[in-house]
């Protein structure tokens, strides 16, 4: 029987395993050094905040794996011998495989800051990071202040986590506005405001120079590059992005750049070796996507795709329209299609924007200034239907069409106040148009079903 | 703000302590005249009971409620024992006439209920005499303290949004020691209420003036329960309003259950009694209202003329027409989390415990077996009751209707719905009764699962499997198991509380009523992937 070995039990590896089991009888082994059972990495924050226990982050009960004949192996892969199709764990144990899937995910970036390996310095990525945080920042008495370095999604989550236990937080962000390499100014500035509402000491345009140690090798303070200011703290969170976690493949002959190099079929340069998820790097980018996509959804989709290939239905990884979501403290964010920040948007991309006068709610719609084709939407504090936007993107609808039928796309809970009319009024007055809002229609919404 | 909260907690605990302490206060004794009137009212023929009761409770001694209760129960036992001995004796002598004559002297009924009735007449002391003051020191302090504890959250919780910080870090909400204390308190409360009402007669005194004001009648332990229920729901609704102030669905839903509890379950029935109509809760549908078809109830309704008949017809129409039609259009949530009193308590008092329900596959199997057994039980019992009503025969194949009714009333009505159903909130989550026991929920569930427009829509491929939805599902549905597969959630047990949708950090879930086509949508490959792959795999 064919033996498929999967390195990594995150969303990519586990999705691949589940789909291979659905479609075939091959022997499946998942190897992980982090935890025995699959858990949702994105939910780690809720464990520290007390919304969940760690067990709640595990989507499958423990019996699930044996019932589905997916063998779980706790161990760290040291070397891969691609010529003889075996791999070796740090413990010395050897595994033979017929097909190998590398799904080893990411690790937090460290940019060579002095003091970056001191006790009390941590990322927020692995389960071990959570354990570390519980150790160094159990409460505001032990951790009198924490400094977070890096203004992305993990940084703001870590800030939210620490604030849930009333720990003072200083948040160093290199950019002059939060996440403005990705978000348009309107949204980035709104998040800046919201961060300050949560009593987080937000330092924009600020870099870390070094982390200083006390006499026991623990964090004592950090020094700011620009001003030389010293900020005393007990914990430093490094959240300046992630990088593929692939040190163990470096002598295996598998080609790598920043990540494991793969083609559109998720194949590496070595036959029978595949790479998926955060650790995979496309030779050629797909559409406007990055070569390395460290996103939950793309990990899952790559898992679904490679499983098809390994079950005899060779399938190219062709993700559909881009979508993503996040939550910035209390503000939910969803995006469908492409909305680039001012810094990186294309020449013909223009925005239509609306922001609620008082609440933290806003949208940006990106469209082509000549053809008026709808390119993408960011929504903050308003939920939208994935299916509807996916369909509109496929059908190359115009911005006028999208606004006219915007009520179909709303996904907020029942009885919520709707803003489509206000949004449309703003568009009409800015563009001298007279688009009338259509009433929500179940028929259109479920036309695909 | 934190100081106010702490003060509130202290005041609440003082109120609670005084409330519990009230049980032990007061003195109970009767005058000969009072006792004679009681015996006359009850029509007791036994001479012995009179002497025994006189010996026990016509006294100048200051008996507390427990002594008083035990003296009465002793008197009843002594009297009954005496006549039992005579019965045995005449039986041995084959003196059938004399044997038969003894039965009329026996005292029937639950001893603690009889004691309650007597105690209600016999009490003196703080609760009975300084009722207003005592009401303030117990109910009053409890309400004020609880509100002082709850209201500062407007500020302390910060900006509106989901505020579940620290829930699993607090001993009150993670089955810690506070949770166990709450469990013991609630279970004890229900045991006293159902089985030892005489012991809480002092509490009943506290609400006597309110009962007199509303219905003109003397308060029973059930009036106390109804009043307390409304008070607890109102106070905890304030907590809901603050916690979910960003979420209009939760605000409206909370207002609705509160309205139906106070107006339909509490005020209207009491006012009906004032006008000498039968006590009836118009929203309480059979089979949750399990004694609706009992012979005594039907007899009572029929004997109260046109209005009684109206209730009878309404009760039948409610169960057979209104309930299923509404479930078809809106899902069972219209009843379970917008109208029902049990649901109302679960969604207010029980909200802090919703995360404690078990999500395992095992508990789902267990749930289905138990809840459907209760449904079968209630239907069998009702068939017996109706047969008895129409035929007049009090038994079928040797099984007495009364026996079945008594067993159901004890096991399901009291133990399951009360002691376990509410008492176990702090340990097994807030919908123990609704999830495992309620026969109406089982009936609504069938309709919701097989013929309804209601579903929880999963938003394409946006789920990140974080588990907030499953954790905060009070009904123990593993919501994530569906959401992460891109499937809508169509489950008979869903009561549509809307909290899964509220706690989702990625906007994945929405409760909605839409066309039946495509409501159940099993998927293999999720949205976001290549369209060809999706259709290839999903259409297989």
Image (spheres, rainbow, N blue to C red):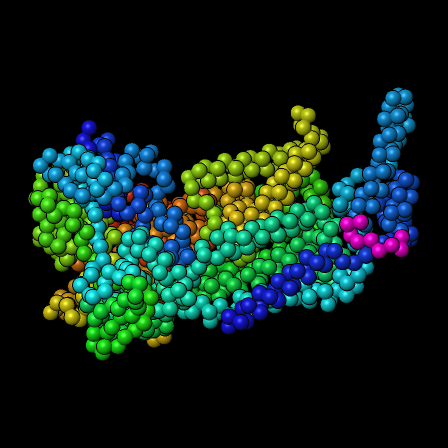
Nearest the eye: B107 or B268:
B107
User: A241 or A365: which is nearer to us?
Assistant: A241
Q: Is residue A153 visible?
A: no
The percent coordinates of residue B328 (x first, y second) are 45, 47
Residue positioned 79% across, 58% down in the render: B26
Name the outermost residue toward the front: A215
The main secondary structure of the magenta stretch is: loop
Left or right: residue A355 compared with residue A254 = right
Q: Residue furthest bottom?
A: A227
Q: Nearer the viewer, residue B57 or B521?
A: B57
Residue A352 coordinates in the image, percent (x, y)? 22, 70
Where are the magenta residues, as a range? B59-67
Does the magenta portion include B306? no
Residue found 36% across the figure and 40% down from its top: A62
Q: Position of residue B192 (x, y in %)?
A: 68, 48
Using the image as rendered, state which of residue B425 and residue A361 is in the foreground: B425
């Amino acid at each position: 029987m064919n033996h498929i070995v999967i390195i990594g039990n995150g969303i990519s590896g586990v999705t691949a395993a589940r789909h291979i089991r659905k479609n075939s009888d091959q022997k499946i082994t998942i190897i992980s050094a982090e935890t025995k059972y699959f858990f949702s990495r994105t939910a780690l924050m809720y464990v520290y905040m007390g919304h969940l226990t760690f067990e709640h982050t595990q989507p499958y009960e423990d019996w699930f794996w044996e019932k589905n004949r997916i063998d779980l192996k706790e161990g760290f892969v040291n070397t891969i011998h691609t010529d003889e199709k075996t791999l070796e764990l740090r413990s010395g144990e050897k595994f033979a495989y017929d097909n190998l899937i590398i799904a080893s995910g990411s690790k937090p970036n460290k940019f060579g800051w002095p003091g970056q390996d001191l006790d009390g310095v941590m990322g927020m990525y692995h389960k071990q990071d959570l354990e570390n945080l519980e150790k160094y920042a159990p409460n505001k008495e032990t951790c009198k202040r924490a400094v977070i370095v890096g203004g992305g999604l993990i940084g703001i989550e870590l800030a939210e986590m620490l604030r849930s236990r009333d720990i003072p937080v200083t948040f160093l962000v290199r950019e002059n506005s939060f996440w403005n390499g990705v978000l348009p100014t309107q949204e980035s500035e709104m998040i800046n405001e919201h961060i300050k509402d949560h009593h987080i000491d937000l330092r924009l345009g600020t870099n870390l120079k070094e982390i200083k140690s006390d006499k026991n090798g623990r964090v004592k303070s950090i020094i700011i590059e620009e001003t030389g200011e010293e900020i005393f703290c007990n914990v430093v969170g490094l959240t300046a992005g992630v990088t593929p976690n692939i040190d163990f493949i470096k002598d295996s002959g598998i080609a790598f750049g920043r990540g494991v190099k793969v083609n559109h079929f998720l194949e590496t340069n070595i036959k029978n070796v595949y790479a998926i998820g955060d650790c995979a790097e496309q030779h050629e980018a797909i559409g406007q996507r990055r070569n390395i996509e460290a996103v939950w959804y793309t990990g899952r989709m790559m898992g679904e795709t490679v499983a098809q290939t390994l079950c005899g239905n060779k399938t190219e990884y062709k993700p559909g329209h881009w979508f993503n979501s996040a939550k910035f403290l209390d503000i939910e964010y969803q995006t469908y299609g492409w909305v680039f920040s001012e810094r990186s948007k294309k020449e013909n991309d223009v925005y239509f924007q609306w922001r609620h006068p008082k609440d933290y709610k806003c949208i940006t719609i990106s469209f082509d200034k000549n053809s008026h084709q709808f390119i993408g939407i960011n929504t903050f504090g308003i939920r939208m239907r994935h299916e509807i936007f996916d369909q509109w993107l496929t059908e190359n609808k115009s911005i006028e069409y999208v606004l006219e039928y915007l009520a179909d796309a709303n996904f907020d809970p029942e009885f919520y106040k709707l803003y489509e009319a206000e949004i449309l009024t703003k568009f009409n007055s800015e563009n001298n148009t007279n688009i009338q809002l259509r009433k929500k229609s179940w028929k259109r919404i479920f036309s695909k079903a | 703000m934190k100081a106010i909260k702490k003060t509130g907690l202290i005041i609440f605990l003082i109120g609670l302590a005084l409330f519990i302490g009230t049980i032990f206060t007061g003195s109970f004794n009767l005058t000969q005249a009072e006792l004679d009137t009681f015996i006359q009212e009850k029509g007791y023929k036994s001479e012995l009971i009179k002497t025994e009761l006189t010996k026990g409770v016509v006294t100048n001694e200051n008996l507390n409620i427990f002594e008083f209760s035990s003296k009465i129960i002793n008197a009843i036992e002594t009297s009954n024992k005496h006549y039992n001995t005579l019965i045995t004796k005449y039986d041995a002598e084959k003196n059938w006439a004399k044997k038969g004559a003894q039965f009329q002297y026996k005292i029937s009924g639950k001893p603690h209920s009889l004691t309650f009735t007597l105690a209600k007449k016999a009490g003196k002391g703080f609760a009975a005499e300084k009722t207003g003051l005592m009401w303030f020191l117990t109910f009053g302090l409890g309400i004020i303290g609880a509100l002082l504890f709850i209201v500062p959250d407007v500020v302390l919780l910060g900006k509106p949004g989901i505020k579940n910080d620290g829930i699993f870090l607090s001993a009150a909400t993670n089955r810690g020691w506070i949770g166990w204390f709450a469990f013991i308190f609630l279970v004890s409360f229900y045991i006293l209420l159902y089985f030892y009402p005489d012991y809480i007669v002092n509490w009943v005194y506290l609400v006597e003036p309110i009962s007199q004001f509303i219905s003109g009648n003397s308060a029973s332990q059930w009036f106390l329960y109804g009043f307390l229920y409304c008070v607890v729901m109102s106070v905890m609704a304030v907590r809901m309003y603050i916690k979910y102030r960003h979420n209009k669905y939760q605000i409206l839903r909370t207002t609705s259950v509160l309205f139906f509890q106070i107006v339909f379950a509490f005020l209207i029935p009491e006012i009906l009694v004032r006008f000498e109509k039968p006590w009836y809760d118009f929203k309480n549908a059979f089979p949750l209202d399990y004694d609706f078809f009992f012979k005594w109830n039907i007899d009572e309704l029929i004997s109260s003329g046109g209005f009684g008949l109206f209730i009878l017809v309404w009760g039948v129409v409610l169960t057979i027409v209104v309930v299923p039609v509404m479930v078809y259009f809106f899902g069972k949530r219209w009843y379970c989390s917008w109208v029902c009193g049990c649901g109302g308590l679960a969604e207010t008092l029980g909200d802090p415990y919703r995360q404690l329900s078990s999500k395992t596959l095992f508990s789902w199997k267990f749930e289905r077996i138990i809840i459907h057994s209760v449904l079968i039980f209630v239907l069998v019992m009702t068939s017996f009751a109706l047969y008895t009503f129409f035929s007049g025969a009090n038994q079928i194949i040797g099984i007495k209707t009364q026996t079945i009714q008594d067993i159901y009333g004890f096991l399901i009505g009291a133990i399951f719905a009360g002691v376990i159903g509410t008492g176990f909130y702090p340990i097994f989550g807030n919908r123990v009764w609704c999830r495992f026991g309620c026969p109406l929920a089982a009936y609504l569930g069938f309709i919701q699962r097989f013929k309804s427009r209601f579903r929880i829509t999963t938003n394409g491929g946006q789920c990140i499997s974080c588990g907030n939805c499953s954790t905060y599902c009070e009904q123990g549905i593993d919501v994530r198991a569906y959401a992460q597969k891109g499937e809508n959630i169509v489950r008979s047990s869903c009561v549509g509380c809307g909290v899964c949708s509220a706690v989702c950090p990625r906007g994945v879930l929405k409760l909605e009523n839409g066309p039946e086509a495509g409501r159940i949508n099993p998927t293999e490959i999720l949205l976001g992937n290549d369209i060809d792959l999706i259709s290839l795999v999903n259409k297989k």
